[in-house]
Image: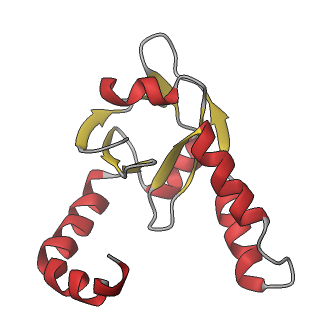
Amino acid sequence: MFLGRYEHTIDSKGRLAIPARYRAALERGLVITRGIDRCLTIYPLAAWEALAEKVNSLPLADANARALRRLFFAEAVDATLDGQGRVVVPAALRAYAGIAEQATIVGMNTAIEVWSPARWAEQAALLEGDGAGLAERLTGLI
């Protein structure tokens, strides 16, 4: 389970240190891909396989399904943690998310989001400003 928020640096080789409490869940491997909100999402291999199966089951005739496949798979990379708990984040993915030297790592229960600090600050402000409204709109789901 991935919970919490952390601030980390990305070194000149594009390596991002994964918080120590997340590392055990990523030992089998991980997949990094574009997130929906201009962030990156890191999935443990088992979670990625389950998501990939769901996305692959969507009908190819549906334009939205094809677009979702492209979003998740086109830039996805499989990776492993190095001995110091770091993962190399490819330059194209860093550019997509606007991540340079700093990253905000956010636990999302079954996956990890990686944000540029500025974009995360925007998201956090939206959540603070509309948390009650969001909860009200999603009442039927909870």
Percent position (x, y) of residue 17?
38, 26
In this picture, residue 103 sits left or right of residue 130 = right
Q: Quadrant of residue 121?
A: bottom left
In this picture, residue 55 sits left or right of residue 41 = right
Is 136 in front, or is 85? 136
Residue 12 seen by the camera: no
In this picture, residue 5 sits left or right of residue 34 = left
Percent position (x, y) of residue 132?
14, 82
As displayed, is residue 15 above or below residue 42?
A: above
Percent position (x, y) of residue 70?
72, 65
Task: Look at 44% across and 67% down and name the residue there.
Answer: 37
Quadrant placement of the C terminus: bottom left
Is 90 in front, or is 111? 111
Percent position (x, y) of residue 51?
64, 56
Residue 14 seen by the camera: yes
Is 34 in front, or is 109? 109
Task: Look at 34% across and 38% down and name the residue there.
Answer: 101
As displayed, is residue 19 above or below residue 31?
A: above
Quadrant placement of the N terminus: top left
Count of number-bearing discs: 0
In this picture, residue 108 sits left or right of residue 35 = left
As displayed, is residue 75 above or below residue 2?
A: below
Task: Look at 51% across and 60% down and name the residue there.
Answer: 35
Is 28 in front, or is 40? 28
Task: Look at 42% across and 25% down and name the residue there.
Answer: 23
